[in-house]
Image: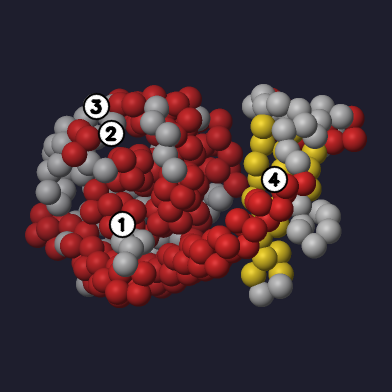
Amino acid sequence: MTGEYAFRIINDLEDQEFSNSLATKLILEEGFRSSLTVPVFRNNKVFAFLFVNSRKKYAYSRVDGKKLFFISQTLGKILHYCYIIQTALSAMAQSFVNLVEFKDTETGNHIKRVANYSRILAEKYSDEVIELPAVKVREIYNFAPIHDIGKVGIPDTILLKPGRLDPQEWEIMKRHVEIGQKIVKNANVLIRQMTEEDLLSTAMKIISDHHEKYDGTGYPVGKKGEEISIEGRIVAIADVFDALTTKRPYKDPFPFDQAVDMIRSEAGKHFDPVLVELFLKATNEIRKVFETYKD
């Protein structure tokens, strides 16, 4: 960084002084050969950086550095606001998670597994099918753990029953989707009043859609195919796979490989076949999460 206007220019990223760093190697792999970096200040502290890269060497001058520095300071308040909002949303999601853990018998590791399985699938989908904004992938990871938050409104006699539910009990259990929708919708209304943004829309889609099935036989609405949000389709696989591989009051866990085969067999029926294919490609990553967060 230099002078009154803080910025750094690297005219030749292939220069040995810079090219040995991992970050520079990744930038070079993308075909860039020079870069301009400026800090973003808030309350006299650096909280972010703006990076501009060019495929040409010696693409930037001190004038460019000064201009980008001015832009970064103009954007600083907006960027800081976005950062605070995302941090608040993450904290809210964790609070919801704690609420679910307090009520349900499912463990904290269940929540971590579902979150990480969902993240892996979202990243694979973004890389290989349709690119998702980075914030969307992050929201899927953050909000996947609250997919069943509505269970806080289900009577303990049903929620904690040590065995299978009878048909009447099952109908009551299915109401947890509606309860979860109401909880998050009310929170979203308050947030919209302050920010004019629907910042919990991803959470709403996950809660509403993760029990829907690709062939239209799920609940609560019976959505079919791509009528089901991508968020719901992703978390559906993550949640079911975790249910298969863990012990429940009514069943012993299935072995990992058998559970993978069961997911495969439901392609086009319970699950989006494209996502099932991505899940199968990612089994090594899925297994690492499974082993790391075993109960």
Measure how far apart labels 4 and 2 are at the Cα level: 50 Å
**Residue 64 marker:** 4
Q: Earlier in the sequence, mark 3 or mark 4?
A: 4
Label count reads 4
Closer-to-camera residue (135/276): 135
**Residue 271 marker:** 2
Q: Is residue 61 left or right of residue 127?
A: right
Marks 1 and 3 close (CB-CB < 8 Å): no
Closer-to-camera residue (165/188): 188
Image location (x, y in percent) of residue 133: 44, 43
Measure how far apart labels 1 and 3 are at the Cα level: 26 Å
- Please give the residue where the numbered disc 1 appears in the rendered image: 201
Q: Is residue 137 left or right of residue 206?
A: right
Label 1, residues with CA under 10 Å away: few <14, some 14-19, many ≥20: some
User: What's the amino acid at mark 3?
Assistant: Gly
Examine the rendered structure and indicate whether residue 179 appears above or below residue 9.
below
Measure how far apart labels 3 and 4 are at the Cα level: 53 Å
Closer-to-camera residue (118/79): 79
Marks 1 and 2 close (CB-CB < 8 Å): no
Q: Is residue 293 left or right of residue 43?
A: left
Marks 3 and 2 close (CB-CB < 8 Å): yes
Residue in the picture at 48% in, 25% down:
281
Residue in the picture at 48% in, 45% down:
134
Give the foreground label among 1 and 4: 4
Closer-to-camera residue (107/229): 229
Measure how far apart labels 1 and 4 are at the Cα level: 38 Å
**Residue 143 marker:** none
- Please give the residue where the numbered disc 3 appears in the rendered image: 268
User: What's the amino acid at mark 4?
Assistant: Asp
